[in-house]
């Protein structure tokens, strides 16, 4: 087999129930030019036997074994053994999308990337409450778009500002030559090793990109580091990340804005260490006495007064709860008064509206009354004129009758005179 395009590095510790699903998801990739480097980290179950069968039947699966030294050491072994130009770290209880390697490889090749970041989706095995799965997916979800190739520090700061940053190494593919050039490796012997590794690689990377593609699936299981109860090892992991990251920052130049964003990330390490330490049992807290004197001094600074702070916080929380209750009671009374006031104002508004409607009706009625009076006056004027005209007609009729009587009289007089004339004529 020639030099593969991608090396998939899988640290394995007691993962017999998940190994086949994990490795098969790699072997079924659409791009087949890869190698799978499995490092058994001293498993006490059948993990090694399962890995051995894969290595014997599939030439792309390479198996290494070591005594239990932790995931960081296993990943570092994988880096040193990798033959490909691109490296991808996959946990033994997770799986990837069938086209994950092809998509990531083509994106890195076409844009000459040092690191490519993508999305994941969490799922819980039986016994994991759904709210925990939902919370994890909210944490992993990237809300903003970053549609460009950035410098590592620039993308880190942008994602920190937008609360999109997470350090998970199974959400990224990295160029091997960049890893060797930067000399970054996983810090051995701690948990939260991803925090330090991702911070260091992003600070040094010249060309990075994020794509909105879910290419990985994260299993949440009851006995994993992600879900088990917190012990001193978790606090110590954050302490180491804080100490080493601060040392790393001093060795690399940053702008003022970049430094501000990065220091906020370091403060989150300190806050996590302080809060977790305050929740530990007394027996767990005493484990800090095993540190060197120098580390013990720095550790004390990192978690200073954590117990007092937590007690004060609990006291303040209690006082706050009392204030919240008082506030809620006052708010309830204010709401009741406001509701009464609103009802009164509503009633006043209704009365005012009805009064306005009544006034409008009154004005309309008065207008109608005025119109009737006007029409009545006009009718009376017409009646007066009609009576006057009637009187004029009667007067003219009387005058006409008088004239007719006079004419009749004149006719009678003429007839009389005519008769007399005729009589005189006869006599004559």
Image: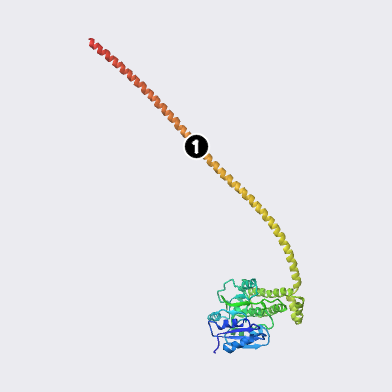
Toward which corner of the image does residue 314 lie, by quadrant?
A: bottom right
* Disc 1 packing (10 Å; few <14; some 14–19; many ≥20): few
Q: Residue at x 48, y 36 (%)?
A: 375
Query: Which colour scheme appears in the figure?
Result: rainbow
Q: Residue at x 61, y 77 (%)?
A: 218
Say which of 298 and 362 sits in front: 362
Indicate the position of residue 302 as horizontal and vertical percent values.
73, 76
- Quarter of the picture containing the C terminus is top left
Left or right: 172 as drawn, with respect to 396: right
Q: Which residue is mark 1?
A: 372
Q: Position of residue 202 (x, y in %)?
A: 62, 78
Q: Is residue 384 visible?
A: yes
* For residue 332, side relative to residue 149 (left or right): right
Q: Position of residue 347 (x, y in %)?
A: 62, 48
Q: Is residue 115 left or right of residue 232?
A: left
Of 373 and 110, the residue lying toward us: 373
Residue extending furthest toward the top: 427
> In the rendered image, which quarter contains the N terminus?
bottom right
Tally of numbered tags: 1
Residue 263, above or below 5: above
Q: Residue at x 63, y 50 (%)?
A: 345
User: Toward which corner of the image does residue 229 lie, by quadrant?
Assistant: bottom right
Which element carries disc 1, helix, strand or loop? Answer: helix
Q: Position of residue 110 (x, y in %)?
A: 53, 80
Residue 211 seen anywhere in this rendered image of the structure: no
């Amino acid at each position: 087999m020639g030099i593969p395009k991608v090396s998939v590095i899988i640290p394995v510790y007691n993962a017999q129930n998940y190994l086949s699903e994990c490795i098969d998801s790699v072997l079924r990739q659409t791009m087949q030019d890869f190698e799978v480097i499995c490092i058994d980290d001293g498993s006490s179950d059948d993990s090694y036997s399962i890995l051995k069968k894969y290595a014997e039947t599939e030439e792309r699966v390479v198996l290494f074994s070591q005594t239990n030294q932790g995931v960081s050491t296993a990943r570092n072994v994988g880096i040193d053994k990798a033959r490909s130009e691109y490296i991808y770290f996959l946990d033994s209880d997770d799986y990837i999308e069938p086209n994950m390697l092809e998509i990531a490889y083509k994106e890195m090749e076409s844009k000459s990337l040092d690191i490519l970041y993508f999305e994941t989706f969490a799922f819980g095995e039986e016994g994991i409450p759904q709210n925990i799965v939902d919370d994890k997916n909210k944490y992993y979800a990237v809300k903003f778009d970053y549609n460009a190739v950035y410098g590592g520090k620039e993308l880190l700061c942008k994602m920190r500002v937008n609360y999109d940053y997470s350090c998970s190494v199974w959400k990224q593919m990295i160029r091997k030559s960049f890893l060797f050039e930067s000399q970054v490796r996983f810090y051995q012997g701690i948990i939260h090793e991803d925090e330090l590794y991702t911070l260091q690689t992003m600070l040094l990377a010249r060309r990075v990109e994020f794509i909105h593609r879910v290419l990985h699936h994260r299993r949440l299981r009851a006995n994993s580091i992600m879900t088990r109860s917190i012990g001193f090892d978790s606090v110590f992991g954050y302490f180491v990340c804080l100490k080493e990251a601060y040392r790393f920052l001093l060795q690399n130049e940053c702008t003022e804005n970049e430094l501000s964003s990065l220091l906020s990330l370091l403060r989150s390490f300190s806050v996590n260490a302080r809060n977790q330490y305050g929740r530990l049992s007394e027996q767990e807290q005493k484990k800090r006495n095993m540190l060197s004197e120098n580390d013990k001094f720095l550790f004390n600074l990192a978690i200073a007064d954590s117990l007092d702070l937590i007690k004060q916080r609990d006291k303040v929380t209690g006082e706050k709860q009392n204030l919240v209750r008082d506030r809620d009671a006052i708010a309830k009374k204010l709401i009741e008064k406001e509701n009464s006031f609103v009802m009164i104002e509503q009633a006043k508004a209704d009365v005012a509206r009805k009064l306005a409607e009544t006034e409008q009706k009154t004005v309309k009625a008065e207008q109608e009354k005025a119109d009737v009076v006007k029409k009545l006056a006009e009718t009376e004027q017409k009646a007066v004129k009609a009576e006057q005209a009637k009187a004029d007609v009667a007067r003219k009729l009387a005058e006409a009758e008088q004239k007719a009587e006079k004419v009749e009289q004149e006719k009678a007089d003429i007839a009389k005179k005519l008769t007399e004339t005729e009589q005189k004529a006869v006599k004559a």
